[in-house]
Image (cartoon, rainbow, N blue to C red):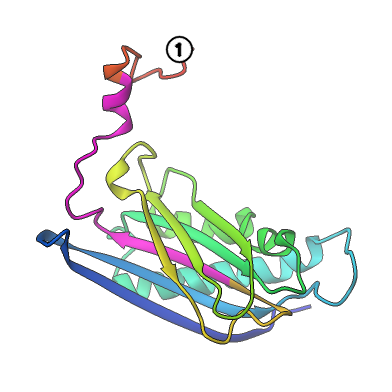
């Protein structure tokens, strides 16, 4: 069964001043979302989610990735990235997870931006206008704290009870006045091997 998309949207946010101080380089955040009918809603408990995952996740992954790349201008320009799903109240958290926690969804985005790190994620349930939270991290360096960001937005009429909002987020730049250091400095301060933090 093909995924039913009710609507899509794109949001671009530019931060010019943070903490009362002009940003040396403005931070740009991008959100692409699709509001889809939950293919499992109203069917009781469904044991096998794979048919709908296979039918829907690649469509959404390709669509949302294209929206982000078209807005940013190139995959190379993306620095931070993440994904999110919000399930309407007639669905399970598992339904949102099914659509975003699969390589059939995420690989479109990873490959388009040339990423090495995993996609940061959030999956929640809520009514229309529920917060859509998209955590971001550096696409190539999980320890680069300047790019630990969270996009928060909402859609006034979504998700309906039988819908799921699926979203991708991107950043150009990190927090404008980043000054807490990176994970590697902590490891060094603690006397741990930065190249081998687990001591293996």
Q: Is residue 103 above or below residue 58?
A: above
Q: Secondary structure at mark 1?
A: loop
27 sits to left or right of 126: left
Q: Nearer the viewer, residue 140 or 179?
A: 179
Screen quadrant of the N terminus = bottom right
Q: From the top left corner, tell me how far across and down residue 20 is, in percent.
A: 12, 62
Q: From the top left corner, tell me how far across and down residue 185 is, in percent.
A: 26, 26
Give the total of numbered labels.
1
The structure residue drawn at horizontal position 59% and vertical position 61%, both measured from the top left corner, is 105
Badge 1: residue crowd in 10 Å (few <14, some 14–19, many ≥20): few
The structure residue drawn at horizontal position 68% and vertical position 71%, both measured from the top left corner, is 56
Q: Which residues are magenta?
A: 166-187
128 sits to left or right of 42: left
The quarter of the picture where residue 51 lies is bottom right
Q: From the top left corner, tell me how far across and down residue 120 is, in percent.
A: 48, 51
Q: Nearer the viewer, residue 107 or 87?
A: 87
Q: From the top left corner, tell me how far across and down residue 16 is, in percent.
A: 15, 68
The structure residue drawn at horizontal position 32% and vertical position 61%, both measured from the top left corner, is 171
74 sits to left or right of 43: left
| Disc 1: which residue | 199
Magenta segment: does it hold 91?
no
52 sits to left or right of 105: right
Q: Residue furthest front?
A: 20
Q: Is residue 98 above or below residue 88?
A: above
The structure residue drawn at horizontal position 24% and vertical position 38%, both measured from the top left corner, is 180
Q: Is residue 76 above or below residue 64?
A: above
């Amino acid at each position: 069964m093909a995924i039913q998309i009710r609507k899509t949207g794109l949001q671009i946010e530019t931060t010019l001043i943070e903490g009362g101080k002009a940003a040396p380089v403005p931070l740009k955040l991008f959100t692409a979302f699709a509001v889809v009918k939950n293919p499992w809603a109203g069917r009781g408990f469904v044991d096998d989610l794979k048919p709908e995952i296979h039918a829907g996740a690649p469509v959404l992954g390709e669509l949302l990735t294209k929206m982000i790349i078209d807005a940013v201008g190139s995959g190379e320009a993306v620095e931070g990235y993440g994904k999110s799903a919000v399930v309407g109240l007639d669905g399970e958290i598992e339904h949102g997870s099914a659509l975003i926690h699969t390589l059939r969804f995420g690989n479109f985005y990873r490959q388009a931006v040339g990423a090495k790190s995993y996609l940061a994620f959030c999956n929640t349930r809520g009514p229309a206008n529920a917060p859509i939270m998209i955590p971001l991290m550096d696409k190539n360096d999980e320890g680069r704290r300047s790019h630990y960001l969270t996009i928060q937005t909402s859609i006034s009429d979504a998700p309906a009870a039988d819908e799921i909002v699926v979203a991708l987020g991107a950043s150009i730049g990190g927090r404008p006045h980043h000054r807490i250091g990176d994970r590697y400095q902590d490891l060094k301060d603690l006397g741990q091997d930065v190249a081998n933090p687990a001591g293996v």
